[in-house]
């Protein structure tokens, strides 16, 4: 549980995953915003910035890598917890080089994801990958 209501953005193109992650993150005491695409999330940054982003890598049109690159360009300074069902050493390295705070495989262990989010929000470094 967290003391404040940190805002966590969940970005995943799969509706069932978005809903499940949203419920999980909300149950841990965070405020949650969910986005169906990388472009939708990037547009939202003009209005408000979350304390952490849970980001799927493999999405159509604007991938998680594209989102990470754009966040780096605009110097968003928002910690990113990457989740992916298509694990590869190259993808992991690329994502971590683009600044991911953690890199987790789907299906994501709930406790591991919440620990990574909490560490990212508090500024502590979570383990980079699991």
Image: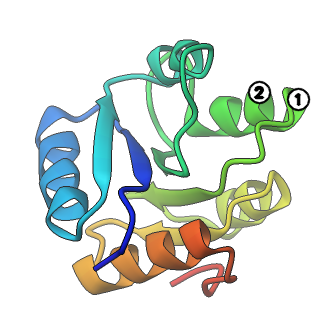
Point out residue 12 in the picture as x, y percentages from the top left corner.
35, 37
Secondary element at tag 2: helix
**Residue annotated with mark 1:** 73
Q: On the image, which quarter does residue 62 sit in?
A: top right
Relative to 1, say whether 38 is above or below: above
In the depicted view, which residue is nearer to us: 31 or 80?
A: 31
Look at 51% across and 18% down and name the residue there. 44
Determine the residue located farthest toward the front in the rendered image: 3
Residue 22 disc label: none
Q: Position of residue 84 (x, y in %)?
A: 44, 57
Residue 96 versus residue 110: which sits nearer the camera?
110
Query: Residue at position x 55%, y 51% from top?
Result: 51
Other-residue count near label 2 (Cα within 10 Å), few / some / many at <14 / 14–19 / ≥20: some
Residue drawn 13% across the image and 43% down it: 19
Please indicate whether residue 68 sits to the left or right of residue 6 in the image.
Answer: right
Residue 29 placement, left or right of 101: left
**Residue 77: image location, x then y, percent:** 77, 47
Name the foreground residue: 126 vs 92: 126
Q: Nearer the viewer, residue 117 or 110?
A: 117
- The reply to whether callout 1 and callout 2 are in contact (CB within 8 Å) is yes
Q: Please tell me whether residue 97 is drawn above or below residue 65 in the rendered image.
A: below
Above or below — where is 4 with respect to 33? below
- The image shows residue 61 at horizontal and vertical percentages of 52, 15
Picture quarter with the N terminus: bottom left
The dot on residue 70 is: 2
Quadrant hosting residue 47: top right
Q: How many numbered callouts?
A: 2
Q: Is residue 109 left or right of residue 103?
A: left
Q: Residue drawn at (78%, 55%), measured in percent from left and top?
A: 94
Rate crowding at label 1 as few (under 14), some (14 to 19) or many (20 or more) other CA atoms within 10 Å. few
């Amino acid at each position: 549980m967290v003391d404040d209501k940190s805002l966590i953005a969940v970005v995943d193109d799969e509706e069932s995953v978005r809903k499940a992650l949203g419920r999980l993150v909300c149950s841990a005491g965070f405020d949650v915003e969910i986005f169906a695409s990388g472009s939708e999330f990037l547009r939202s940054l003009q209005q408000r910035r979350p304390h952490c982003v849970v980001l799927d890598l493999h999405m159509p049109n604007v991938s998680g890598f594209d989102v990470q690159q754009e966040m780096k360009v605009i110097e968003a300074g928002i910690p990113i917890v990457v989740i992916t069902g298509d694990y590869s050493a190259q993808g992991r390295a690329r994502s971590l080089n683009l600044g991911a705070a953690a890199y987790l495989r789907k299906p994501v262990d709930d406790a591991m994801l919440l620990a990574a989010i909490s560490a990212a929000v508090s500024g502590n470094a979570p383990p980079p990958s699991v």
